[in-house]
Amino acid sequence: MESMTGYAYMEGNTADFSYSVELKSLNSRYLETNVNLPKVLRNDENDISNMLKDSFSRGKIELNVDIYDWTGTRPVSVNGDVIRKYYDELKKIQKELDVNEPVKLDSVLLLDGITQRERSTVTEKTRREIYDSIRWVIKKATEMRKKEGRSIRKDLSDSLAAIAGCTKSIKALSRNSVAEKRDQLRKRIESIAGEKIDDMRLLTEISILADKLDINEEIVRLNDHLNKFKSYLREDGQVGKKLDFIAQEMFREVNTIASKSGSSEISHTAVDIKNYIDKIREQCRNVV
């Protein structure tokens, strides 16, 4: 079992610059990948996105790569033609305005388009180092997801055991429920009719009552759901949606048990089961 929550971070240095790689994984109904790269790595976005898709099957995956502290300076070129054009235009304006102050070269150099800095590039060796770092954070985030998944599986197993115990108690309580209702019915009839009781009519009423109160079918289905849930816990791959669906079915059976039973003890025990199922469903939403 694997959780959808994970995190990994690392920093590194290459011959060209320092960098950091961060990977965050959150809950999502499907697989979503978001890759944030600096401009010099923008052409690698598709390849890196495919790395994430190959490594994760579900969750919202966000990868951030930041570059800083370049070790080398990028060459700068000066456009002489643009400088001359600026200078000539400024001289014309100076003459038109009758300005005697000379045109200073340092003022011209501040104008747009004078200097051009060559684009930074990433060497293949540096690119391989960054890719290795991305693989490392993927591995660490996956390890964290699996570790949390083991913890979730244990919690789910504990909740299942608690539900199984409550279901066993409900089954035991339901055996006495019909007998108690039968005695209550007999006493009510006796208080009205005295000793003149039609046993066949009484048996018919008890039979109808027993049918209304019978929750054995729901208990059987609930136990079946528990066993199915346990089998999914032992499976690999994507089981989160399956577990959530089984938990919904369990909730439906418990609701029916609570509504059919006239026993307050059974109703209270059903509430306990609902609380466990709510906890299970909340955890299932974080399972791959």
Image (cartoon, rainbow, N blue to C red):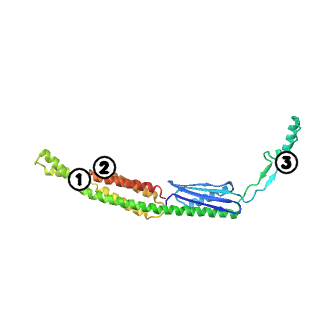
Question: For the residue labelled by badge 3, is the local secondary structure a helix, a strand or a loop?
Answer: helix
Q: Nearer the viewer, mark 1 or mark 2?
A: 2
**24 to the left or right of 129:** left
What residue occupies the far front of the structure in this picture? 101
Q: Residue furthest top?
A: 97
Is residue 257 visible to us here? no
Asked whether residue 176 is in view, the answer is yes
Q: Amino acid at mark 1?
A: Ala
Mark 2 is surrounded, within 10 Å at the Cα level, by few (under 14), some (14 to 19) or many (20 or more) other residues, namely some
**Along the line of sight, the residue nearer the viewer: 150 or 110:** 110
Graded by Cα atoms within 10 Å as few (under 14), some (14 to 19) or many (20 or more), the crowding at tag 1 reads some
Distance in Å between CA atoms under marks 3 and 1: 102 Å
Residue 100 lies, in percent from the top left, at 89, 38
Front one among 207 and 17: 17
| Rendered position, 234 above or below 190 | below
Q: Position of residue 58 (x, y in %)?
A: 52, 57
Dots 1 and 2: beta carbons under 8 Å? no
Q: Which residue is mark 2?
A: 259
Q: Which mark is residue 139?
A: none
* Residue sitting at x 37%, y 55%: 250
First reached walking from the N terminus: tag 3 or tag 1: 3
- Looking at the rendered structure, the kind of residue marked 3 is Asp
Which is nearer the N-term, disc 2 or disc 3? 3
Query: Residue 37 appears in which quarter of the rendering?
Result: bottom right
Q: Are marks 2 and 3 in contact (CB under 8 Å)?
A: no
Label 2: state its secondary structure: helix
Comparing 255 with 160, the one in front is 160
Measured from the top left, where is residue 210 in percent x and y? 23, 53
Q: How many angstroms separate mark 1 from mark 2 (CA)? A: 14 Å
Seen in the image, is 185 located left or right of residue 128? Answer: left
Task: State which tag comes first along the sequence, 1 or 2.
Answer: 1
Label 1, on which residue?
210
